[in-house]
């Protein structure tokens, strides 16, 4: 079973508008962390935002915010006031087991966002 | 900001040849990773490395793969006998601390491996 599911392979948004990228996750661990990364066409992976399972408030970082609905196991990324430079692939990722010696992230399939001028 | 560096950025090789992908993690980081991404697809975990040994590996990381930290600064991924399906972008990543949940991984810019 997929641990992280991103159901939108591609999205379009008009410049200056807000867009929501969906992410659902599957874990039985009560402690987990959720991350979003951006991958522009140049290929690098850029960290955007983090949400912990015990965090009471939704995370925000500038124009990025996370709509965290724990009971629904969803952690959707909201980008406000889209810019042309936001065109990229976006990955949702999860870390489980805070006591492990691994710390690996498990990634979803990604969503390609295109911002139209 | 410190960064993870990977070399080369592109590598072309013939099927059956050995390749070594190189990475220099951030200097005070203790946990190292290799991920791969087949064109346009998800980023897949290959292996994690801590305290000079593999801490976890995925099913993809079979006997053809090995990792090494030869000199305290470099972290390498070796593919012994490349196959066509090894063609992918390979990302190195590092983090200072893996215990806990909020330590992000810092990724390098990747090595695009093409096996012909």
Image (cartoon, coloured by chain):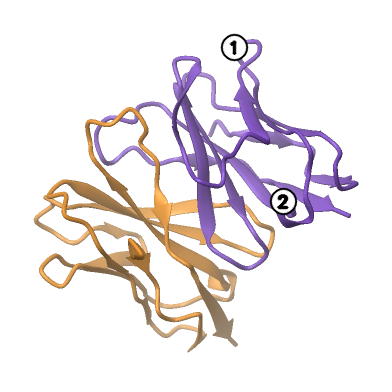
Chain colours: A orange, B purple
As helix, strand or loop, the secondary structure at mark 2 comes to helix
Which quadrant would the N terminus of chain A be assigned to in this image? bottom left
Chain of the residue under the numbered disc 1 shown in the image:
B
Measured as percent of width and height from the top left, residue B61 is found at 57, 40
Q: Is residue B87 left or right of residue A72?
A: right
Residue at 57% in and 27% down: B25
Measured as percent of width and height from the top left, residue A37 is found at 46, 57
What is the crowding at mark 2: few (fewer than 14 residues within 10 Å), some, or many (at least 20)? Answer: some
What is the crowding at mark 1: few (fewer than 14 residues within 10 Å), some, or many (at least 20)? Answer: few
Identify the residue at the far front of this view.
B63
Q: Nearer the viewer, mark 1 or mark 2?
A: 2
**Residue annotated with mark 2:** B86
In front of the other: A93 or B109: A93
Q: Vertical placement of B35 versus A80: above or below? A: above
The numbered mark at residue B72 is 1
Q: Is residue A37 left or right of residue B5?
A: left
Residue at 63% in and 68% down: B40
């Amino acid at each position: 079973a997929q641990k992280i599911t991103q159901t939108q392979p591609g999205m379009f948004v008009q410049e200056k508008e807000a867009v929501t990228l969906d992410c659902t996750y599957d874990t039985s661990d009560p402690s987990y962390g959720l991350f979003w990364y951006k991958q522009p066409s140049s290929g690098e992976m850029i960290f955007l935002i983090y949400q912990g399972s015990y965090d009471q408030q939704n995370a925000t970082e500038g124009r990025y915010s996370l709509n965290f609905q724990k009971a629904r196991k969803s952690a959707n990324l909201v980008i406000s006031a889209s810019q042309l430079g936001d065109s990229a692939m976006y990955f949702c990722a999860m870390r489980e087991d805070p006591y492990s010696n691994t710390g690996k992230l498990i990634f979803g399939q990604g969503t390609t966002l295109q911002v139209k001028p | 900001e410190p960064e993870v560096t990977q070399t080369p950025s592109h590598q072309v090789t013939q099927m059956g040849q050995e390749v070594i992908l190189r990475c220099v993690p951030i200097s005070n980081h203790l946990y190292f990773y290799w991920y791969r991404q087949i064109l346009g697809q998800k980023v897949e975990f290959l292996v994690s490395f801590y305290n000079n040994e593999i801490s976890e590996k995925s099913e993809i990381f079979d006997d053809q793969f090995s990792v090494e930290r030869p000199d305290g600064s470099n972290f390498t991924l070796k593919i012994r006998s490349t196959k066509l399906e090894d063609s992918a972008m390979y990302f190195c990543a590092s983090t200072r601390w893996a215990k806990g949940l909020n330590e992000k991984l810092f990724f390098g810019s990747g090595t695009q491996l093409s096996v012909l």
